[in-house]
Image (cartoon, rainbow, N blue to C red):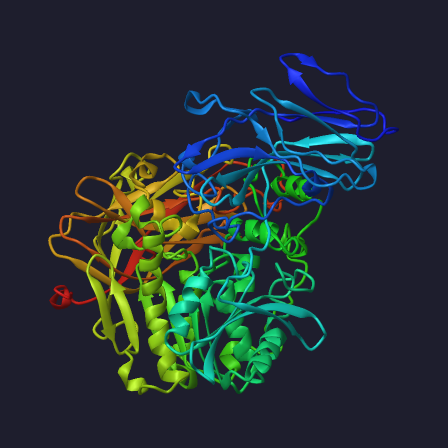
């Protein structure tokens, strides 16, 4: 850990010493003495990791510009929570002390650089050998100390910031130490092939905007991307993506949204995207290289900004390609992932607001979700950062306003533009995006121009065919894998934009629906669900065995179930652990969840082994009756594919919150849509529980707010089954004669 000793505040910096064994050099008057931990370098090919401390960074509250975090700050690629990958790529810390990894004995290097302001002192690089360093610095109310780690690539001498070990700061005349590790990500340099412009909005706010132009084209159609994840970061890959668009004759314009990275303005998600989208398109069509036609493209939040531009109704906007997103993204972050009933608060959404929407940069840390009240997990970080997220505060622990970005006009009410809805069957936003899809399909003016592409991938573009993902297929770290992924990522979008932005082909050349049947391949159809798809129902029965070890109870054809009751528990001190730490990259890990069914607080129901393939193609839901000993209760449901070896992998999931749980209540759980083949000799399995932590905020078990409760209470839930109200799994499947599809 970092040891901080506060002494009197009368003198400036006077010493840098060493801490040898237990002998600390005399503390200079007027300083905070920080004893920094040993950290052995880690050698990884040509890379060597060294600790680094920048005095300039300390004085100005910033960590040196880091690598792309490998995710949108809230989207950690690995279930271990590592920024860059597995433990081979990061230093380890035990109690905050540096490890002597693999027995490596190497120099501890600390880079002390930058000026000390009025003190007139400058420290050069100092090698401290194998011993911790004592750094004496004058601190004030605004100073933060970061002990950060960088990768040094000995081949090109580039530096990339990694996680700091901990923070120390002064407040109210006392020194404070936080063991929370916080990484800050600043803007990366503008790419060599881009030209950055400062584009003014109607209120004078300037947004940083990169333009990539095709060669030898005087006037080009434009593809616009507006995102909050640093337009120049490796994570969004736009230097590589832009090449694919410019090679097809498009100009590509990529912009940091208001309040993020190089763009001016307050950091407020969702609020300005309609007007800023209109003003940016207006700027594009006024440029000499523009032919006046604009399309949009992108994922997640930069899918949402496309819907905001649709609401703006700029006449130059010809088509959009929103991927793994929803036009209700603001309410998903506020309320949860939704379904048929009241949603369960989604912890990853709270983390996203708390880490990405604090200021112009982005943060990453691992909150201590054992804190009670749970809000303290984030308060610790806000205190260490020295700033708060206004969007987090507006929604946690309670929503303070119902104002939304589309209060005056909603995309479904806007003038339709051709849209390619790109859905990931394993995306954590699949349920709300498919809700958008089906809503627009019910509106004839939108249905005429809505096209659907739905595949077996997750939010981070990992695919089922490669799951779990090995190093050679991980586009987060392997350049060849990245190139392969980006070819798939952009190809359908380019074909769609060629039709509706460039007018190169007829709309008749595009399939209305292109969808992937997991474990089989891509299909096309005229509608979704595909023609001929019908519902099939299974009863949840064998109740006396459901709370025991797998296979538990049984899934049988509808009408063959039995009446009865079965209970399962909710214990706030022994919650059902989430299968992955990061659901955005679910397929990276693609975990075997068979062991979860052996827990006593999980109901399990398993079908007989299939003799013929079952092709799921459409919506899936569970309809049941549940009561609780608590006034509120959560019901989590997963549908899994059980392989011949006993491993069980999730197909779809859903959850709902019951607010009148002491009375028998309907638990109607939307599990979303899928295209997935359950192969012969496999079985279906349903898991039912009352927690999924930490992906979702645990219930209080009382009438108290789940964010602020200090003593959450245990409860018992009961599944009630009768002839009138069976507990039923309802799937949509293709007829068996189509099961030879390929």
Which residue appears at 81% of the width and 24% of the height?
A: 7
Q: Which quadrant holds residue 383? A: top right
* Foreground residue among 226 and 596: 226
Is residue 457 in view from this perspective? no
* Residue at the limit of the structure toward the top, as seen here: 22
* Foreground residue among 157 and 190: 157
The answer to whether residue 529 is left or right of residue 362 is: left
Q: Which quadrant holds residue 31? A: top right
* Residue at the limit of the structure toward the right, as seen here: 10
Give how far across and how far down residue 72 sits, in percent: 51, 54
The answer to whether residue 614 is left or right of residue 501 is: left
Q: Quadrant of the N terminus?
A: top right
Q: Quadrant of the C terminus?
A: bottom left
* Foreground residue among 409 and 252: 252
196 to 714, vertically: above or below: below
Give how far across and how far down residue 454 sits, in percent: 32, 66
Give how far across and how far down residue 709 sits, in percent: 62, 40
Tell how many labels. 0
């Amino acid at each position: 850990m970092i040891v901080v000793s506060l002494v009197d505040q009368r003198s400036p910096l006077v010493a840098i010493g060493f801490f040898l064994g237990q002998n600390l050099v005399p503390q200079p008057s007027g300083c905070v003495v920080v004893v920094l931990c040993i950290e052995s370098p880690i050698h990884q090919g040509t890379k060597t990791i060294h600790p680094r401390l920048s005095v300039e960074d300390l004085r100005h509250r910033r960590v040196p510009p880091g690598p792309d975090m490998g995710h949108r700050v809230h989207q950690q690629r690995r279930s271990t929570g590592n920024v860059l990958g597995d433990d081979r790529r990061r230093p380890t810390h035990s109690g905050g002390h540096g490890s002597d990894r693999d027995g490596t004995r190497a120099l501890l290097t600390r880079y002390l650089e930058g000026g000390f302001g009025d003190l007139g002192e400058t420290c050069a690089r100092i090698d401290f050998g194998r011993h911790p360093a004592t750094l004496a610095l004058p601190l004030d109310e605004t100073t933060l100390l970061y002990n950060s780690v960088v990768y040094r690539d000995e081949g090109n001498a580039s530096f990339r910031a990694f996680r700091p070990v901990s923070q120390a700061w002064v407040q109210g005349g006392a020194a404070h130490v936080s063991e929370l590790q916080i990484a800050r990500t600043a803007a990366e340099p503008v790419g060599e092939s881009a030209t950055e412009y400062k584009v003014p909005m109607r209120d004078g706010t300037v947004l940083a905007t990169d333009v990539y132009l095709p060669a030898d084209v005087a006037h080009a159609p434009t593809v616009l991307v507006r995102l909050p994840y640093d337009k120049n970061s490796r994570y969004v890959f736009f230097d590589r993506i832009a090449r694919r668009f410019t090679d097809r004759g498009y100009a590509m314009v990529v912009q940091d949204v208001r309040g993020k990275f190089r763009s001016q303005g307050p950091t407020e998600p969702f609020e300005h995207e309609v007007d800023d989208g209109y003003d940016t398109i207006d700027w594009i069509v006024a440029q000499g290289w523009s032919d006046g036609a604009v399309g949009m493209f992108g994922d997640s939040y930069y899918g949402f900004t496309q819907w905001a531009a649709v609401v703006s109704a700029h006449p130059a906007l010809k088509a959009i390609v929103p991927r793994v997103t929803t036009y209700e993204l603001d309410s998903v972050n506020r309320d949860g992932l939704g379904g048929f009933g009241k949603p369960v608060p989604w912890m990853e959404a709270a983390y996203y607001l708390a880490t990405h929407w604090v200021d112009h940069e982005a943060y990453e840390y691992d909150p201590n979700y054992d804190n009670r009240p749970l809000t303290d997990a984030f308060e610790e970080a806000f205190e260490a950062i020295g700033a708060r997220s206004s969007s987090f505060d507006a929604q946690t622990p309670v929503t303070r306003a119902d104002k939304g970005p589309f209060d005056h006009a909603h995309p479904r009410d806007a003038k339709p533009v051709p849209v390619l809805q790109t859905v990931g069957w394993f995306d954590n936003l699949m349920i709300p995006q498919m809700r958008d899809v089906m809503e627009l399909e019910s509106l004839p003016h939108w249905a005429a121009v809505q096209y659907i592409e739905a595949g077996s991938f997750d939010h981070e573009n990992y695919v089922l065919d490669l799951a779990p993902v090995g190093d050679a297929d991980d586009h987060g770290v392997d350049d060849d894998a990245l190139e392969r992924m980006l070819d798939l990522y952009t190809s359908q979008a380019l074909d769609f934009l060629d039709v509706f932005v460039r007018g190169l082909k007829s709309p008749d050349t595009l399939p209305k629906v292109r969808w992937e049947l997991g474990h089989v391949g891509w299909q096309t159809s005229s509608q979704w669900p595909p023609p001929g798809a019908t519902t099939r129902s299974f009863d949840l029965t064998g109740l006396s065995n459901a709370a025991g070890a797998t296979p538990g109870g049984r899934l049988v054809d509808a009408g063959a179930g039995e009446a009865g009751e079965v209970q399962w528990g909710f214990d706030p001190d022994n919650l059902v652990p989430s299968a992955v730490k990061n659901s955005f990259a679910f397929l990276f890990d693609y975990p075997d969840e068979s062991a979860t069914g052996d827990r006593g607080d999980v109901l399990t129901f398993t079908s007989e082994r299939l003799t013929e393939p079952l092709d799921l193609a459409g919506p899936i839901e569970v309809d049941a009756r549940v009561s609780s000993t608590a006034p509120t209760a959560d019901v989590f449901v997963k549908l899994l594919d059980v392989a011949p070896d006993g491993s069980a992998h999730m197909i779809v999931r859903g959850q709902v919150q019951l607010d009148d749980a002491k009375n028998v209540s309907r638990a109607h759980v939307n599990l979303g849509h899928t295209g997935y083949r359950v192969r012969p000799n496999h079985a279906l399995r349903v898991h039912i529980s009352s927690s999924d932590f930490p992906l979702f905020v645990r219930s209080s078990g009382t009438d108290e707010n789940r964010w602020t409760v200090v003593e959450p209470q245990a409860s018992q839930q009961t599944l009630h089954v009768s002839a009138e109200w069976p507990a039923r799994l309802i799937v949509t499947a293709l007829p068996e004669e189509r099961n030879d599809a390929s």
